[in-house]
Image: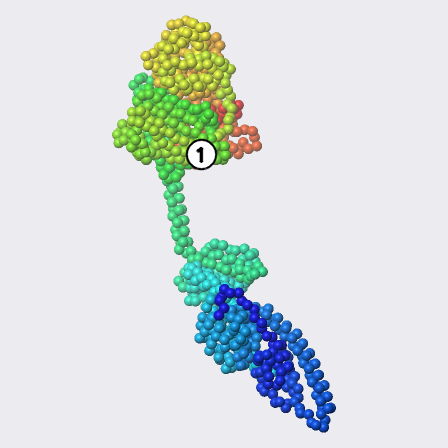
Amino acid sequence: MIPTQRPLQRFPIPTFADKLISAAGCGRQETCSGQESVLAATPSIDERNVDAVRRHSASGLFALGLLGWTPTGGGALPSLSLVTALALAALAWGAVLRWKLRRLTGILDTTLGSTADGILIVNNRGRVISFNQKFVEMWRLPESIAASRDYGQALSWVLNQLKDPEVFHPKVRELYASPEAQSDDRLEIKDGRTFEGRSEPLLAAGRTAGRVWRFRDVSRQMRAEEALAQERSLLRTLVESLPDYIYAKDLESRFLLLNTPGARMMGAQTPDELLGKTDFDIYSKELASQYYADEQRVFQTGQPLVGQAEPCWDPVTNSAKWLLTTKVPFRDGSGRIIGLVGSGRDITASRLVAEELQKAKEGAEAASRAKSEFLANMSHEVRTPMNAILGMTDLALDTELSPEQREYLSTVKASAESLMTVINDILDFSKIEAGKLDMECIDFSLLDNLEETTRSLASPAQEKGLELVCDVGPEVPARVLGDPTRLRQIITNLLGNAIKFTERGEVALEVEVETVDRTGAGPADQDGITLHFTIRDTGVGIPPEQQKLIFQAFSQADGTTTRRFGGTGLGLTISTRLVEMMGGRIWVESEVGQGSRFHFTARFGVGKDVPITRDTEPASLVDVPVLVVDDNATNRRLLEARLRSWHMQPESVSSGVEALTRMQQACDGGRAFPLLLVDSHMPEMDGFMLVEKIREHPEMAGTTIVMLTSAGQRGDAARCRNLGIVGYLPKPIRQAELRDAIADVLGRGPSEAAAPELVTRHTLREQRRGLRILLAEDNAVNQKLAIRALEKFGHVVSVACDGEQALAALEESTFDLILMDVQMPKLDGFETTRAIRERELGTQLHRPIIAMTAYAMKGDREKCLAAGMDAYVSKPIRADELLEAIDAAVQDEPPG
């Protein structure tokens, strides 16, 4: 046997022509070159017969035999001549035949040599007649066997290479026992190859002359078929194992393929029961028509139908079901649609769950709406009387009262404000828990917001003798985009806590820029800025183990603080949630006995810089020397920074004694200070005592004095007038108010200086023009409070009890501003505002409208702005907040 790694050798293979020509040139019983002729298998020929023709059915070739004879004595010469002539003719004819045989059989040999199949031809006696090179290569036939042309050896070699020769060998014997039989076999070779073998009889002159074997290597084809069969089996297993309804249909919507789950879904036991049927044979006409229309649309458009929920009827349970159906067009090799492949999933259970969830969702939404309405109504019902209590108390405190009466009313006001704080905390916490609290994004003045918030807490700070400071860094933008109300709420909570837990010293709010983002990633897609807020106090401090707990709901630093300081313990929880909603974080740094520093960050958009005429720098302030007297270092630093920003020349000292010394030095040098800013509350020598000392020095009489106080007392105004103090401003001082006050007192003429009017924050506001204001409010108490507060500052107020009266009043008169209660009979504030804005369409008129509401729920501000209102004030309304909102709405606008 030839080793498998050895290259195959091509052996000389005798052609059919060689064999047949050799047979034609030999004697009657001779062989040529020791080889057997194809004709050896034919019957013997009588030596005395005239002629014999030997043919091969495959080649159409034949050999011619000559007639045997014996010469006589009398006619030897003529006979010899005749025989010679015939012999020569026979030789010539034989030569022609041999040439034609070689030419024709050459074509056959070439064909056999070029075929991809291995060919073996064997005669009836078991001799190999011929084989091609492919046969040698396929069976790796050794050279010795190929040369011997022994069919037995060749068969033995073939059988030894088969995996199962015992099966093939009997078939060979059967074939030779039945010469006309044919066979087709698949032969597995030991080296892993697979052959297909075909055997047919070789016919000559209508009789079997041998057998032709043809072998083809189908190993690659078999591997491909096995892989394909495995893939088909896998696919079928997958399709059958899926719980989904898998099917294929032709263009007439007849089932061509169906898996078992699909068949059972339609009431059949096996898929075969439904093949060739349509949906009309299974479902009602209505359902079948719907399915058919969907499928025809897929055929016509070529677009798949994906994830469509459609009804179905289950004939097994006799109940309605829902299927999630997908139908995809199926195309042939040319891209022509010949059917579709579809799937359906039973989604009845999930559909029922979804329906139940929808019902539950609707129920929850109804409950949420009811809860929201309850909170809104409760807010309104609580805030409305609280508005009257606080408002009337403020009005009473502005009248002449005995000390005892003032003490009683102050207690009422403090208790009402404390109750309002508790109510607000509970309402806000409820809104947070219900997910009803969200953020606004409007353009507002950050500095005004912070100063107003700080000032609102000045009273409790003054009662404890604390300095309350608002320090906003110069790099902080004047206007930002965000939620001013929620920012105020956070700062109020933190500053209120700082004041509550601080007995002496100061409480400061400090603001600086942490990061700036110019990518438009801030609120409302504006450039973003992250601000860092710090609330610093000199209070009791917080133990380390309590610093995380204080941010949890209903928690305080220890169990005694609730009784000692009061409060709900919700303020920091609410602040924490609000800070997170503003894109920031909150934390605390504290040491027991050393005070605390609460930090939080918040993201804002950068607002538009809107120039305000009142804030322009007065020329009278430029290069004016000013002396600041304050024992608090923070206040001195802030005042110096503000004065320098107005191009003044400030100096500062920390006591009255230092102030007298410095003023004397200035007078001696011929550069007396034209302006003195004095803190009223200082140790050893307070502000009033310092002014009394100054009045004892005639050379200092030209100095203009403005008193700054963090603890105003009744009668301070009279003392100021007696001492020639021209300004009296409470701390924390708003920058705009301080600048306006300084510009006012320095800009007075000689006649005004002789009998100066005391400048206060109220007189500064009173200097602004009076407005004609329409108040739309149905509550009589609220009407009275608003009228008193507005008329006190020179505004003229007209009252409308509902929306209809408000619209009628606008028809008869013109107003600079409208205060609009949201909840009114007949026509509420939203409808009234929309009606006003519709009337203004096509005109240049736009009356500012400020909403007043006791709801303060999620979306209230958005509803107000969407209706056309310009601002929003929540009840209970404080006079200062209302006046600030009015100033912001009508700043420098001409009367309507």
Can the viewer see residue 269 in this picture? yes
> Residue 802: image x %, image y %?
45, 32
Which scheme is used to colour this image of the protein?
rainbow
Q: Residue furthest bottom?
A: 74
Q: Tell me the residue that label 1 is attached to.
A: 440
> Residue 100: image x %, image y %?
67, 76
> Residue 781: image x %, image y %?
38, 27
Label 1 crowd bin: few (<14), some (14–19), many (20+), radius 10 Å: some
> Residue 380: image x %, image y %?
38, 33
Q: Residue at 50% x, 18% y: name it.
A: 617
Q: Is residue 175 or residue 346 the one in the foreground?
A: 175
Above or below residue 102? Residue 374 is above
Which of the 4 image quarters holds residue 408? top left
Helix, strand or loop under label 1:
loop
Can the viewer see residue 730 in this picture? no
Above or below residue 358? Residue 680 is above
Above or below residue 364? Residue 592 is above
At label 1, the amino acid type is: Glu
Q: Is residue 136 or residue 670 the one in the foreground?
A: 136
Q: Is residue 213 left or right of residue 707?
A: right
Q: Residue at 33% x, 14% y: name it.
A: 683
Q: Residue at 43% x, 21% y: name it.
A: 734
Q: Residue at 59% x, 85% y: name it.
A: 29
Q: Is residue 88 or residue 101 the one in the foreground?
A: 88
